[in-house]
Amino acid sequence: MIRILLVEDHSLVRAGIRALLAGLDDMTVVAEASDAEGAIRQVAQQNPDMVLMDIALPGVNGLELTAHFRRTHPQLQVIILSMYADEEYVLQALRVGAKGYLLKDSSIGELELAIRAVMRGEAYLSPLVSRHVVSAFVKQQGGDADANGARSRATSHLKEGLATPNQLTPRQREILRLIAQGQTTQGIANQLSISIKTVETHRAQLMERLNIHSIAGLVRYAVHTGLVSLDD
């Protein structure tokens, strides 16, 4: 059982997340907090496996609290919940020790995927967040005018023997392209008229085929191999 602490100052949002997680057999919300003081107290009392935490908390914000937990409880996994896809927030969150960054409008499927990925020791970023971070990275390598050169340099560092896009099925390429464009699981399902479960199955097959185990990694692969353009 994955034991989760919710840290969010809006009680209705906490209630909504708790209700979503209640439908998952191996996850349970063991405590809630509306601020940093309450969160620190609940971590000491409940010893959760994971904290789902908003950035915008009263007083000490979620980023400062994440940094505190990384010092005092290094085994505790933190996923940031946010309304902001800006790469500055994302990079700050990763720097202070968060293992995941999820947008608040994500589906329950994305939330479950993020929790399971982080508990396996992987990082998880919402697809739209991943795209912003990769875009910022490529621009830092030389600006928009040199984006193709940055892609070429990055491609040379891809793992030896990694499958090329042409070795993927048409459906896998289509789903990979939509992931890299920042589409959510629900959005992909709606666009392709398939179920969320089918999208998740294709994504798992992509990760296994490419030996890439994060959404951010899939986005980088799609950009580096030219499957998508940063201007798409």
Image (cartoon, rainbow, N blue to C red):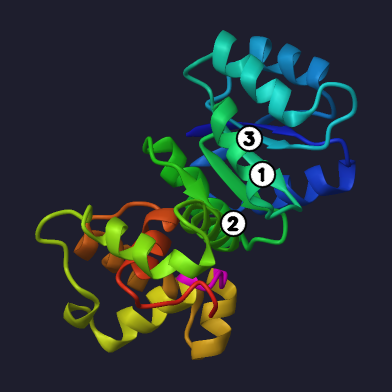
Which of the two discs, 3 and 2, labels the residue nearer the N terminus?
3
State the separation of the CA atoms marked 1 and 3. Answer: 6 Å
Residue position for label 3: 92
Identified at 31% across, 79% down, the residue is: 172
Residue 7, quarter of picture: top right
Amino acid under disc 2: Val
Residue position for label 2: 129
Relative to 152, is 28 on the left or the right? right
Q: Is residue 172 above or below residue 47?
A: below
Amino acid under disc 1: Glu
Identified at 33% across, 85% down, the residue is: 171
Tell me the crowding category of disc 3: few under 14, some 14 to 19, or many 20 or more residues within 10 angstroms, Cα based: few
Where in the figure is residue 86, as x and y percent of width and height?
69, 52
Describe the element under mark 1 as helix, strand or loop.
Answer: helix
Which label number is shown at residue 88?
A: 1
Tell me the crowding category of disc 1: few under 14, some 14 to 19, or many 20 or more residues within 10 angstroms, Cα based: few
Q: Main secondary structure of the magenta part?
A: loop
